[in-house]
Amino acid sequence: MRLTLHTDYALRMLMFLAMEPGRPRTIEDIATRFGISRNHLMKVAQTLVQSGFIESLRGRGGGLKLAREPATLKLGDIVRATEDGFALVECFDGARDSCVVSAACRLRSPLQEALAAFLAVLDRYTIADLVSHPATARRMHRLLSATASPTH
């Protein structure tokens, strides 16, 4: 299984915002620090706003900030909101299933069980778990500060 870039960027954005939860950040700032496309990040932000993970603030001093406390943002919920679907194999999608052995195949059940286990593990962790360890937070701050332009 592989997560999309959309989900990867969403997790990065949320971690970054969680490092200073009360401080709004611009798309430009986040894109620069992570070295990723501003346009792609705008789509990610839109998904996160629609899902209630972040807020978009307009006007002077605006930007993006967490809509909830980092400890309430479960990784499983974020992955479910940002992934297009979890059709690991063709037979997971009945409308597109053209596999000739689907009616007799026993692969679907173990794959569904594995997917459920994957999401269950992610449900045990929050964004706070990823950024709250002091040494990790300091290292992330250093790495992200090094990528910021001098004007930020």
Image (tube, helix red, strand yellow):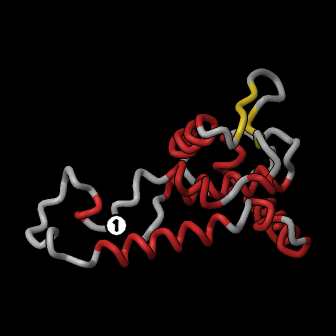
- The quadrant of the image that shows the C terminus is top right
Q: Position of residue 103 (x, y in %)?
A: 14, 68
Dot 1 crowding, Cα within 10 Å, few <14, some 14–19, many 20+: some
Q: Is residue 52 left or right of residue 134?
A: left
Q: Is residue 84 left or right of residue 106?
A: right
Whether 38 is drawn above or below 110: the answer is: above
Q: How many marks?
A: 1
Residue at image location 78% in from the left, 63% down from the top: 146
61 and 118: which one is in front?
118
Kind of residue indicated by mark 1? Leu
Q: Position of residue 32 (x, y in %)?
A: 67, 51
Which image quarter: residue 52?
top right
73 and 38: which one is in front?
73
Residue at the limit of the structure toward the front, as seen here: 104
Which image quarter: residue 76?
bottom right
Which image quarter: residue 63?
top right
Q: Position of residue 8 (x, y in %)?
A: 56, 60
Q: Position of residue 48 (x, y in %)?
A: 61, 42
Residue at the limit of the structure toward the left, as seen here: 100
- The quadrant of the image that shows the N terminus is bottom left
Residue at image location 59% in from the left, 68% down from the top: 120
Q: Is residue 100 left or right of residue 51?
A: left
Residue at image location 45% in from the left, 70% down from the top: 115
Whether 145 is drawn above or below 44: the answer is: below
Which residue lies under the disc numbered 1? Answer: 88
Whether 108 is drawn above or below 36: the answer is: below
Q: Is residue 93 left or right of residue 116?
A: left
Residue at the limit of the structure toward the top, as seen here: 59
Identify the element where label 1 is drawn. loop
